[in-house]
Amino acid sequence: MREVWMSGAAYGGFRKRPGDGAAELAGEALRALVQSTGVEPDRIDAAYGATTFGGSLMTQRALQGIGVSGPPIFTVENACAGGGSAVHLAWVAVASGMSECAVAVGAENLSDLGGGTLPLSSRDVEVGVGMVMPAAYAMRAQRYLTDFDVPADVLDLVTVKNRRNGALNPRAHFRQEVDIEDVQASRAVADPLRLLHCCPNTDGAAAALFCSAEVARSLVGPSIRVAGSAVRSGEFHNRHRDMTWPDITARTSAAAYEMAGLTPADIDVVELHDAFSISELLHTEALGLAERGRAHVRLREGEFARDGALPVNPSGGLLSRGHPVAATGIAQINELYWQLTGTAGDLQLPGPSVGLAHVTGGGIYGVDNGACSIHILCA
Amino acid sequence: MSDQAMTRRAEPELFVVGDDGGVHLVVSRCARCASPWFPARAVCGSCGSAEVTAERVGPEGTVYASTMVRIGPPAFETPYCLAYLDVDGLRVLAPVQAEGRSASGSLAPGTPVRLVAGAVGDSAVPTYVARPPIDGGDHDA
């Protein structure tokens, strides 16, 4: 395996864009990627796209928007972890030497599905009795608050922090700060979760470029090194499961830390999967970034704020940026690219050098999540 | 294999109702690794063994976690209560209902429940539901 460099990041949408299909949004992100990196499209020798609702051959349709057809092109589906999975496959392609210059792109149009909770597989036994994603996280929240004797306002504090961060992010779907009273006054979704504890359904796309050192040197933009790239699937069983411990996150991060030769103490900035406010606490602990049952204390003390010891979701996270399902994993990695290359504008943190991006998702019975992807990036 | 057998998909039997009205879930247990499966499976999802035997578990269970769903899928009238239950080593999700109506609040972890037959959503097919204790449990869990 050889070193893989990330040499560009771009996005499209991250707004309500009814009528614009996933491939159209992906094409918009790809055009911005070509423009910002100066890569000649004919150097792109592999493409990995991700979408859950965007239809067959989304990636071919998107790449046509930048005049690329002919090389190997794939569309992968891994629910919320689709974007991270596409990046992982691009990393595999370049690391193995098969590809010199690969793109990863994720895109989704959720407006066209109508409103409300995302549709889950109708053949699932839990969906058949009324399971929706907010309910799954609501039950995890109830257990976390009960098991660790946590005041419920900690869920509000996650939202307040991430919305404050998102107010600085030109890519965020929601750019208005909220306070605890706003969160508590928002509509109940699944007790104890309210609307402002849930990320919005958003339409958008994100694209990133991964290449060999030689190609990276030839491009106009800065590059960062992909130090760790890991994907794992959920372990399927119907036995007892501690739902406050997302073991898929722990297993995937262990693989990523080992590959990078780093530990949680080396991480300077984190973008993680806060699809619901409770998720940020659970995953912060499972990533080894907070002690078990203690993330809520460190959050309350401000350690995960932009100016804290370990900024978590300084982009505003999914709670602000929105969650175009398969685009999210790449959007997070892009936010880290801008942080680590010193090009994050109003969002810029003081000189972070190691970032970790985490997505996990998928509502199927018998696993805590269907798939998880983690990337560790170094300036 | 006959044409009919090739084209018809057998729906697994999910549960049986005992003489006392309690629901017993039909579970398969792996002879090799002892994993329980609900709905029953012909092949163990943990180790791949096809040596699975049918068992029945329930009707008594304990709430692991619970929520009141207030925004749900179109086929479901909100609000409705759901709970993950531990039933003889099995973790299963069930609607929480009493007297044919959803419980009015989340049940606290540890609440004992009993599985009985009921209906959910817009389906006329009977399914299993969890009946809370008479006092309805903790409404502010």
Image (cartoon, coloured by chain):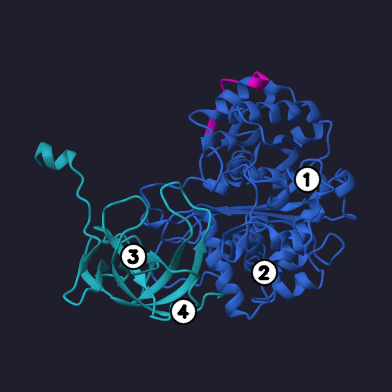
Chain colours: A blue, B cyan
Q: How far apart are the alpha carbons under marks 3 and 2?
A: 45 Å
The local secondary structure at tag 4 comes to loop
Find residue B77 and name its label.
Answer: none
Left/right placement of residue B66 relative to residue B61 reads right
Q: Is the magenta stretch mostly helix, strand or loop?
A: loop
- Residue situated in front as seen by the camera: A94 or B126: B126
- Subunit bearing disc 2: A
Q: Which amino acid does label 1 sit on?
A: Tyr
Left/right placement of residue A258 relative to residue A125 reads right
Question: Do the residues bearing badges 1 and 4 touch, measured as CB atoms within 8 Å?
Answer: no
**Same subunit under labels 3 and 1?**
no
**Which residue lies at the image location 87% right of the left edge and 54% below the top edge?**
A349
The local secondary structure at tag 3 comes to loop
User: Of label 4 and label 3, which has the lower sequence position?
Assistant: 3
> Residue A135 magenta-drawn?
no
Q: In which quarter of the image is the C terminus of chain B?
A: bottom right
**Which residue lies at the image location 44% right of the left edge and 65% below the top edge?**
B82
Q: Do we see residue A269 in this rendering? A: no
Residue assigned mark 2: A288
Residue assigned mark 1: A337
Q: Which amino acid does label 2 sit on?
A: Gly
- Residue situated in front as seen by the camera: A97 or A35: A35
Image-quadrant location for residue B113: bottom left
In magenta, the rendered stretch is A65-74
- Subunit bearing disc 3: B
Residue assigned mark 4: B137
Residue assigned mark 3: B100
Q: Nearer the viewer, mark 4 or mark 3?
A: 3
